[in-house]
Image (cartoon, rainbow, N blue to C red):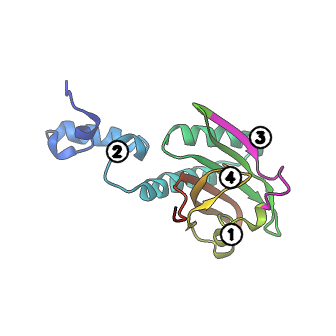
Amino acid sequence: MIHASPMKICSPQRIPGSSRRLILAALCALPLAACGGSDSEEEGVEKALDAFARDLNARPIVPAELPARIRAYLSSNPSFFGSTVTLLDASLKATTSPYVFKKGVGYADSNLIDDKTYGIDSQPWLVPARDSKTSTWTEPYFDAGGGDIWMKTRTVPLLRDGLVYALVTTDLPTKDPSPK
């Protein structure tokens, strides 16, 4: 039996040959955050969110099931603050956007569409990815009406036949960037 701290397990060169291969195979199934590896937080989000986006593209999206799927994604990546899957209509307007985020020791959820003052279709996390059809990061911003914290957001557009039909995000908490 190997007794090692999580950091040692994440350093495969310290584990002998065949055991290393077995452990690496097992680690590939874990979320990056569980490893505490050398990738930056942003790289961890990119890898996890790209995998989540592939899963969403591979299975039909049922709006009523989205909060549970998002909650499972966040539970597997505890350093992430929140996530949404925003479905778009043919005119690229948001039709639903269940948002799951940390609240106390658990998670809360809301639908960003329900708050008419939020202006979802003009949010800095939505517009660039929707319009460019590419993954984007926001600069730090205060997400009033969503998470109500300073955050930065990674957004991945989901495409079908070259058209954006949904956007999936991950939020990372940040500090207020303004000088004190």
Q: Is residue 133 above or below residue 156?
A: below
Type of amino acid at the residue the image marks with label 3: Ala
- Residue assigned mark 2: 36
Work out which residue is located at the far top of the displayed protein and give it.
1
Q: Which residues are magenta?
A: 107-119
- Find residue 139 and report its horizontal and vertical position in percent: 56, 67
Q: CA distance from mark 2 to mark 3?
A: 33 Å
The answer to whether residue 51 is magenta is no
Quadrant housing the N terminus: top left
Q: CA distance from mark 1 to mark 2?
A: 31 Å
Q: Residue at x 25, y 38 (%)?
A: 9
Left or right of 52 on screen, residue 39: left
Q: Earlier in the sequence, mark 4 or mark 3?
A: 3
- Residue assigned mark 3: 64
Label 1 environment density (alpha carbons within 10 Å; few <14, some 14–19, many ≥20): many
Q: Which mark is residue 85?
A: 4
Left or right of 105 on screen, residue 98: right
